[in-house]
Amino acid sequence: MSKRAFDKIKAGLENAIAISEGKVDPECYRVHVPEEIDVKAIRKQLRLTQQAFSDRYGFSLARLRDWEQGRSRPDSAARAYLKVISQEHEAVERALRAA
């Protein structure tokens, strides 16, 4: 690996750490919303039925089935929400219980 490549990787990691610690102005970076998300895999990872998943996270059962069966796909806001559910489902559940 060249010194230049190493320096770029190091700078990227340092930026990621600063962002995660809240030390960077949010205007300086962009959040990535995945283009594709495997809704069924997220639900299965949490060991929930379609009904339980839709009830817990506020999706209609019909919409969830459409996503899982490929008849439609989540919009960007739903994909972002689903990504958070997949990574931090306990935080989402705490926030929803508190609402």
Image (cartoon, grey):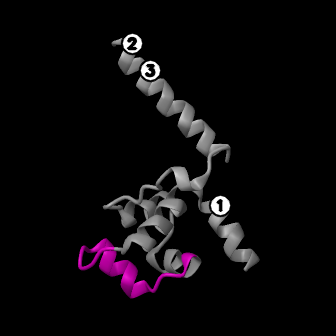
Q: Which numbered marker is on residue 16?
A: none
Residue occupying the point 31% across, 61% down: 36
Q: Is residue 69 left or right of residue 24?
A: left
Res 78 → quadrant? bottom left
| Amino acid tagged 2 | Lys
Residue type beneath disc 3: Asp
Discs 1/2, front: 2
Q: CA distance from mark 1 to mark 2?
A: 41 Å
Start and end of the magenta stretch? 57-73
Q: Residue furthest left?
A: 71
Q: Which residue is more in the foreground, 37 or 69?
A: 37
The answer to whether residue 83 is above or below residue 23 is below
* Residue 68: quarter of image: bottom left
Graded by Cα atoms within 10 Å as few (under 14), some (14 to 19) or many (20 or more), the crowding at tag 1 reads few
Provide the secondary structure element on which disc 3 rests. Answer: helix
Residue 47, given in percent of the width and then of the height, sits at 51, 62
Front residue of this view, candidates 22 and 82? 22
Q: Secondary structure at mark 2?
A: helix
Residue that carries the numbered disc 1 in the rendered image: 90
Residues at discs 3 and 2 in contact (Cβ within 8 Å): yes
- The residue depicted at 41 percent of the width and 18 percent of the height is 6
What residue do we see at 37% from left, 87% from top? 62
Residue at x 49%, y 24% (from the top left corner): 10
Tell me, for residue 3, which label it has, or none.
2
Amino acid on which disc 1 is placed: Glu
Q: Specify the label residue 7 is tagged with.
A: 3
Viewer-side label of 3, 1 = 3
* Residue 63 lies in the magenta-colored region: yes
Q: CA distance from mark 3 to mark 2?
A: 6 Å
